[in-house]
Image: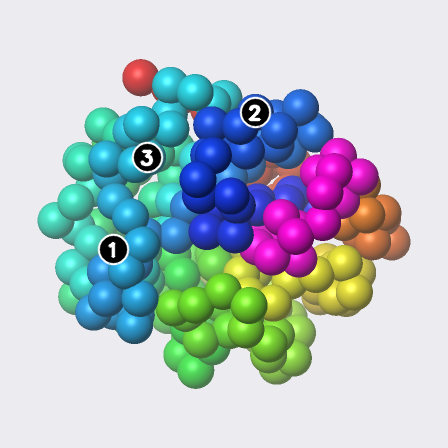
């Protein structure tokens, strides 16, 4: 299991220290939620903040674009230092083209899906993406309750990816993730877990990371997880 702590739950007044503490704890990924107030009912940050953080960290910047028409900003996020861009299938009219452009810019391409969206699109898009993100809450705000139907959705996604000859595509789950559901999530098919307050609200981070890791030990790493671990932080 790869843990990608969500920046929105960190101490926003001292992000430099937070990034340093994550690295010292052994965390390798950082999840950055970009919201525009249109696709979701909240506004967060954009490329300027990511660009300011990039020189201060060797973490893998896992950037989740919860914005309308994300294709307009791909180059901006690449220049800011994103290692992976994840766009929503609901927010892009030409998602295959967008995924191809993300890859052409040298980033990993992720595709996210909201809880109420069917995942049948994987039959046609599975081989165009590097990671699938399943939202386990309705996006927009942290601290929401986990939606248990995600377990069935994880299993269905694994079947569709396999049928599309993309069984090694990693699956990320975002929303309401905590040590209490890590074991079941990893067994159901998750490789990467995003956690906000359930991680940042419990210091020291090294100890908290160990709690998440122990909860995932019942499920041996899949090839998909090993692939995701090989993605490095390619700073410009």
Residue 50's label in the rendered image is 3
Q: Quadrant of residue 146?
A: bottom right
Query: Given this view, does label 1 or label 2 mark the residue nearer the observer?
Result: 2
Q: Is residue 107 above or below residue 117?
A: above
Give the quarter of the figure containing the C terminus: top left
N-term mark: 2 or 3: 2
The Cα atoms of the two marked residues, 1 and 3, are separated by 25 Å
Q: Do the residues bearing badges 1 and 2 touch, measured as CB atoms within 8 Å?
A: no
- Write down the residue under mark 1: 96
Q: Nearer the viewer, residue 49 or 169?
A: 49
Magenta stretch?
189-209
Residue at left 38%, top 19%? Answer: 55
132 on left or right of 66: right
Q: Residues within 10 Å of mark 1 (few under 14, many from 20)?
A: some
Q: Does the magenta portion include 162? A: no
- Residue closest to the far left: 72
What's the mark number on residue 47?
A: none
Say if 87 sits above or below 47 in the image.
Answer: below
> What's the residue at 49%, 21% (across, down)?
58
Residue 60 x, y percent position in the rendering: 49, 31
Q: Earlier in the sequence, mark 1 or mark 2?
A: 2
Expressed as whole percent of the image width and height from the top left, the position of residue 3 reads 64, 45
* Residue 205 in view (yes/no): yes
Element class at badge 3: helix
Q: Residue 157: percent from the left, percent from the top?
A: 55, 67
140 in relation to 169, above or below: below
Give the SS element for disc 1: helix
Q: Which mark is residue 20?
A: 2
Residue 204 falls in image quadrant: top right
Determine whether the residue tagged by mark 2 lies in a helix, strand or loop. Answer: helix
């Amino acid at each position: 299991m790869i843990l990608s702590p969500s920046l929105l739950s960190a101490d926003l007044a001292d992000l430099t220290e937070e990034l340093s503490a994550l690295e010292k704890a052994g965390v390798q990924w950082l999840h950055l939620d970009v919201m525009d107030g249109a696709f979701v009912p909240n506004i967060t940050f954009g490329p300027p903040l990511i660009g300011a953080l990039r020189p201060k960290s060797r973490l893998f910047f896992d950037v989740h674009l919860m914005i309308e028409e994300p294709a307009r900003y791909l180059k901006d996020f690449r220049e800011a230092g994103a290692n992976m861009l994840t766009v929503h299938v609901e927010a892009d009219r030409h998602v295959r083209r967008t995924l191809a452009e993300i890859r052409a810019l040298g980033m990993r391409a992720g595709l996210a899906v909201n809880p109420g969206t069917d995942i049948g699109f994987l039959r046609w898009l599975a081989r165009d993406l590097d990671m699938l993100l399943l939202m386990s809450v309705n996006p927009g705000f942290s601290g929401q309750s986990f939606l248990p139907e995600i377990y069935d959705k994880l299993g269905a996604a694994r079947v569709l990816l396999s049928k599309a000859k993309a069984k090694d595509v990693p699956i990320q789950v975002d929303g309401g993730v905590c040590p209490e559901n890590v074991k079941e999530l990893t067994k159901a098919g998750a490789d990467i877990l995003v956690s906000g307050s359930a991680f940042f609200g419990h210091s020291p981070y090294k100890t908290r990371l160990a709690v998440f890791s122990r909860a995932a030990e019942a499920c041996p790493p899949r090839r998909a997880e090993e692939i995701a671990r090989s993605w490095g932080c390619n700073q410009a």
